[in-house]
Amino acid sequence: MWRRALAIAAVLLATGCDSITQPAQDKAVTGGPHRLTVAYTHQPQSTLIHVAVAKRYFTEVGLDAQLMQHTHGRAALQSVLDGKADVATVAETPVMFSILKGDRIFILANIESSTLNNAIVANMDAGIRTAEDLKGKRIGYTAGSTSEFFLDAILTSKGLVKADIQPVALNPDEMLQAMTARQVDAVSTWNYPLTQIKHRLGKAGVIFYDRQIYTETFNIAAKQDFINAHPETARRFLRALLKAEAFVARHPDEAQAIVSAAAGVDRALVQEVWDAFNYKVVLDQTLLLTLEDETRWAMRNKLVEKVDMPDYVTYVYLDGLMAVKPEAVLIRR
C-alpha cells in the first residue's frame, strides 16, 4: 500500500498544483459518495482509469473509488467474478469466455480500441523471418485472452493451425524472461511486454502485426446484478471516464506522465506506444462483431462447451452511457 501511496503522490506532483486542490463537485451529483471497487490494469489500455484517479474525477462525480491493479484484464475480471471488485477493465476475449460459461456480465463501455496493440514478437535467431516461419516453433501465449485469439488468427491467415506450432502457456509478466532465456522462440502478446521484448531482442527482434484480422476493444465489465442494483453508481463512473477522455484528448503529454507514474513504466515507453491506442468511451458494433467472431473461434476450436451463439446485445448495458452521453451509443438494440 505504501508503494501505491508514493506512486499516487508522484502523479499528483507531476500533474500540477491544480490536481491537489479539492475539486468542485460535479453538478450532476446529488447525495453522498457511492463506494465502488475498481479492478484495472497497469496496461496502456487502462489509461482513462489512471487519469481519472490522478485528476480526482471519481471524487468529482461522487464516487469513493477503491483501487485494485492487476497485470492483465483477465485477472481484473476474475476479481469481479470472485466478488472482490465491482467493475473491471478487460478486453472482450475474457468477457466472451465468461459469458459462454454462464456468467451474467454487463459491458458498460469500451474505453480503448486498437488494431496495433496485439502482435507476435519473434527472435530471428530462432530462424523466424516471416510469420510462416512460426511453424514448428515454441510460441508463448496467454490462454483465454486476446493473446490466444490473435495467435490463432495469425496462424489461420498463414494457412497454419495451433497443431503446427509448440504452444507454451505464459502469463504476460513471464514472457520477457521466457524470451530472454530462449525458453520460447516467439510470443503473442500486447503492450507493454510487446515493445519491451522487441527492445531486449534488438536487431534480432521482429514483430508481426495484422491490422485487418483483429480490432482490440478494452472495456468496463461488471456483474449484471451489481449494475441493476446500482445504476446511479454506473452513471457516475462513466461520467468520470468521460472527463478522463476529454483530458487525454486535450493534454496527451500530461496524460502520458500520469500513466508513466501510476503504472511504474518509463515515460519513453509510454510515448512510444501511445499512438497505437484510441481512447474513447463508446459502445459500437465493433464490440458485438468481435465477440461473435471470437465465439465462433472458441467453438470451432472446442475451447468451450457451449454451442449456441449468445445474443450479446443483452450483455451490453446501454442505459448507463445513454444517460450520460447518448451520442456515444452506436449499438442497435
Image (cartoon, helix red, strand yellow):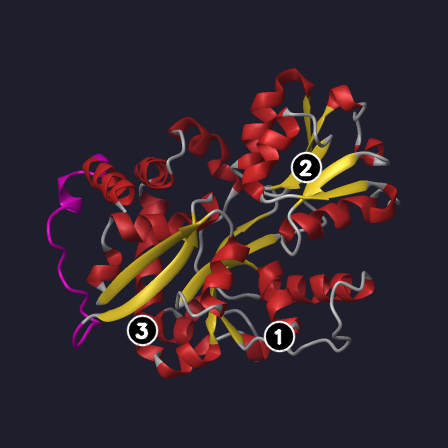
Q: Which residue is mark 2?
A: 187
Q: Is residue 57 above or below residue 260?
A: below
Along the viewing direction, whichever of 328 and 133 lies nearer the viewer? 133
- Residues at marks 2 and 3, CA–CA distance in whole angstroms: 39 Å
| The residue positioned farthest toward the top in the image shown | 203
Residue indicated by mark 3:
233
In percent of the image, x 65 and y 78: which residue is there? 311
Q: Callout 1, which amino acid? A: Tyr
Question: Picture coordinates of residue 227 (x, y %)?
Answer: 41, 77
**Residues marked 1 and 3 touching at CB (< 8 Å):** no
Tell which circle, 1 or 3, labels the residue nearer the N-terminal end. 3
Instruction: Please name the amino acid that badge 2 sits on.
Output: Val
The answer to whether any part of residue 218 appears in the image is no
Residue displayed at 28% across by 44% down: 4
Q: Can residue 283 be seen? A: yes
- Position of residue 37 measured from the top left corner of the image (x, y, whole percent): 34, 64
Q: Secondary structure at mark 3?
A: helix
Q: Position of residue 55 (x, y in %)?
A: 24, 49
Q: Nearer the viewer, mark 2 or mark 3?
A: 2
Residue extent of the magenta highlight? 14-32
Q: Earlier in the sequence, mark 2 or mark 3?
A: 2
> Magenta includes 15?
yes
Q: In the rendered view, tell whether residue 316 sits above or below residue 73.
A: below
Q: Which mark is residue 312?
A: 1
Q: Tag count in the figure?
A: 3
Seen from the viewer's position, the closer of residues 31 and 319 is 31
